[in-house]
Amino acid sequence: MHNPLILEIIYLLLAAVIMVPLCQAIRLGAVPGFLIAGIIIGPSALGLISDVAHITHISEFGVVLLLFVIGMEMKPSFLWKIKRLVFGLGSLQVLVTSLVLISIAKFLLGLNWSAAIIIGSALSLSSTAFVLQILTQQKSLNSEFGRSTVAVLLMQDLAVVPLLALIPLLSESNAVTQSLGFAVMQSVGIIVAVIMIGKYLLNPLLYRVAKSANAEVFTATAVLIVLGTAYLTEIAGLSMAMGAFLAGLLISDSAYRHQIKAEVQPFRGLLLGAFFISMGMSLNIPLLLESPLLVFSLMLATILIKVVILAGLARGFGHNWTKSASIAFILGQSGEFALVLFSLAFAADILTSYQFNIAMLVVLVSMLVTPLLAVIANRYNNKQAAFEGLHNEMPECSVVLAGFGRVGRSIGAILESAGVSYVAFDRSSEIVKKYQDNYPVFYGDVNQSHLLNSAGIHHAKLAIVTLNDTAAALELVESLRHRFADLKIIARAHNSDNCLELLQHGANEVVSENMEASIELTELALKANNIDDKDIQQLLSVFRLNYYNKIRDMTDNL
């Protein structure tokens, strides 16, 4: 007897494998591919998967991991710099948009106050998962446009707390002030606890785990940090995504952040894709066909209202109209938290069945048009970037240094003296702990592509491999050459045979320890015999050149 869950997973993967490359080929992007795949296999089309709820619950962890990775890329010092955008622009966007949408729901659509408050407030929120994924794909996350967008999203996520607390209060007569005050106090308490735990326990824990040199345990620890923090914040009434963001923020200054990011990236990509597929499966096609004019009118009106309000607010916070328009369009859709709020409000009898289904369709259809909104936003953003002559993303480093033992530290010190930026990795937790305060050295396995991508290797001019372990050095050089064909690789070798192997595996340049030590000793010997310095340097240069040319000739002849 076959397992139905396995068959559903096969359907999910098959739909994604077919539709995502197809949508990328016609330049629609990956997100629309996942959405279309979900629509096709969902209950409203082929019906290959009928129970969408359990797929959605699992795939929500993709959003959690996405926010965790974003948190690691945002340092607390950076968030402090954009506090005016978070608490100013973000707060005003949620407040003004909510008031306008609540008024329309109450006085134009005739809803009661409870339903109007929930629908208007929920529709003011945007899709964190969609927007951050698109910003990441466009490499706009670290631009001025990306930072302002993230600031608004952070405030929207924080706004989920009082909105969740409002649902039981609107469904029954309660001491509103007391209940809401308790919910806020509980949330603040959990956040403070998470920050304190992260500050005093996280790095010592990661150091101990890294010292054990067990890759599986390190992976389990990374996932535990994400899920544990997300669970704690969910208990407090905050979203799991916000908890994951806090966890990432606490790790953002850690020497282990690149390796942790490399561990969770595969889970994030897979689960986030499943989340987008589940959104496509949730689309109620029969109801949409029954009331297309109503759904599309409400959706377009919601987007237009949000765009106009946010563009005006962004302009008031110092952005020009071009930048303001790009921020407004990328955040024009409604988000996944609105789906959660509508579901809870329906369960609490605040929304009727018809109101619930129409509201869900408005949100889902607006999420489906997010790629189109992103294209419009990107056009405005590109115009601004061209006008300013700026690029969205700057290189993180010029050199990636693999290994930070005695040789690596010497190279790093010289590079730093010359003003050349670099980032170093080492698998020894002892070395990382000892030197992380004074050097840009991080714990990590440089054979993992996600780790090097996190370090910005695509922008690096070269990689220097200083590993003492010959087999590990050969494996790394071959891996780097396979994944980064244009990257220049310089490798440390022990002797001529090792030089030959490294060149065969893809190194551009090699340096033999035995050869260089011999040359240094010879130079001292010649100076002791009163040979002219100019003659010494010429003699040694010719000898060195012949030595390495001979090795290259051997490589070419193989």
Image (spheres, rainbow, N blue to C red):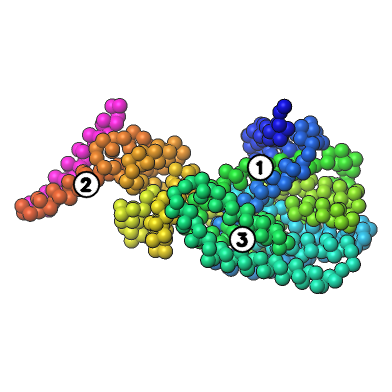
Residues shaded magenta: 531-558
SS for dot 2: helix
**Residue 315 location, quadrant:** bottom right
Q: Which secondary structure is most common in the magenta stretch?
A: helix
226 lies left or right of 441 = right
Q: Which residue is mark 1?
A: 273
Q: Does residue 476 lie above or below 525 as drawn?
A: above
Callout 2 environment at 10 Å: few (<14), some (14 to 19), or many (20+)?
Answer: some
Of the two numbered discs 1 and 2 on the same chain, state the one appearing first in sequence.
1
Q: Which image quarter is the N terminus in?
A: top right
Q: Does residue 318 lie above or below 356 as drawn?
A: below
In the rendering, which numbered label is found on residue 516? 2
Q: Which residue is mark 3?
A: 246
362 lies left or right of 35 = right
Looking at the rendered structure, the kind of residue marked 3 is Leu
Please name the residue shown 88% across and 61% down the image. Answer: 171
Callout 3 environment at 10 Å: few (<14), some (14 to 19), or many (20+)?
Answer: many
